């Protein structure tokens, strides 16, 4: 049985984000568990219940500190930067398995967290794990959004990470926590490692 309308979104009051969840889950049978691919803060702060976790690689995209944050990790006057999954290369991250009974609530929570600003595009990607490939939801960078930090200089990137502070705390903490979480999972991201070294930090 497919989930045409997630719980709590029936009737004429359905919102745009709920319709997006509808579109994503249109072919879901309502009984299968679903995977979510994490590459940034979701690795260390998923914010949802999961029943299994696997290291996973997606191909054709890479982790990049390429989105301005004017709220959570920065301010309008001093924006910070957050990660996006940008095209090209590959990305090693973590795939979380969400139990079928939790899918409607979890996916709506993910929408509120990831889709509010239009900086990401949700896609089902093949996540290559040691056990077997799985199909997982990933939030890809939307290069057409105004928050896309295209072509910024290294000096500006470093200054933004060092100095920006938002509702969720310093941008520096966000970058360091992500680097530590990846390292704890045995994931070697040389770009992020190089950034941390240039910031004069250790993880």
Image (cartoon, grey):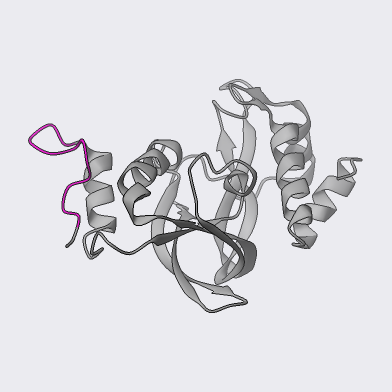
Above-or-below relation of 105 to 73: below
- The quadrant of the image that shows the C terminus is top right
Q: Would you identify the image quadrant in which residue 202 lies?
A: top right
Q: Which residues are magenta?
A: 3-14
Q: Would you identify the image quadrant in which residue 11 lies?
A: top left
Residue 186 spot, x, y in % from top left: 77, 62
Residue 38 spot, x, y in % from top left: 56, 54
Q: Residue at 59% across / 22% down in the picture?
A: 75
Above-or-below relation of 19 to 140: above
Above-or-below relation of 137 to 72: below
Residue 24 spot, x, y in % from top left: 29, 57
Q: Residue at 62% across / 26% down in the picture?
A: 74
Residue 2 spot, x, y in % from top left: 18, 60
- The quadrant of the image that shows the N terminus is bottom left
Q: Residue at 35% across / 50% down in the picture?
A: 103
- Left or right position of 67 against 155: left
- Left or right position of 34 against 15: right
Nearest the viewer among 178 and 166 is: 178
Please tell me whether residue 147 belongs to the stretch shown in magenta.
no
Task: Give the dominant element type of the magenta stretch: helix, strand or loop.
Answer: loop
Nearest the viewer among 19 and 7 is: 7
- Left or right position of 7 against 13: right
- How many numbered tags mark residues here? 0
Q: Would you identify the image quadrant in which residue 82 lies?
A: top right
Nearest the viewer among 147 and 83 is: 83
Q: Residue furthest left?
A: 12
């Amino acid at each position: 049985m497919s989930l045409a309308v997630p719980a709590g979104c029936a009737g004429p009051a359905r919102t745009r984000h709920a319709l997006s969840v509808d579109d994503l889950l249109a072919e879901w049978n309502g009984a299968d568990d679903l995977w979510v691919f994490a590459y940034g803060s979701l690795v260390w702060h998923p914010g949802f219940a999961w029943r299994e976790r696997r290291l996973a690689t997606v191909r054709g995209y890479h982790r990049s500190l390429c989105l301005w944050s004017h709220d959570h990790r920065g301010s309008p006057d001093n924006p910070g930067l957050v990660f996006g999954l940008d095209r090209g290369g590959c990305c090693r991250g973590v795939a979380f398995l969400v139990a079928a009974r939790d899918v409607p609530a979890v996916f709506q929570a993910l929408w509120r967290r990831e889709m509010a600003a239009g900086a990401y595009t949700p896609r089902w990607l093949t996540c290559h794990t040691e056990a077997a490939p799985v199909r997982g939801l990933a939030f890809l960078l939307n290069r057409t959004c105004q928050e896309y930090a295209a072509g910024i200089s290294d000096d500006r990137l470093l200054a933004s990470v060092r100095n920006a502070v938002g509702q969720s705390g310093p941008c520096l903490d966000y970058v360091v926590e992500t680097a530590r979480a990846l390292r704890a999972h045995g994931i070697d991201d040389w770009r992020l490692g190089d950034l941390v070294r240039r910031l004069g930090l250790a993880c």
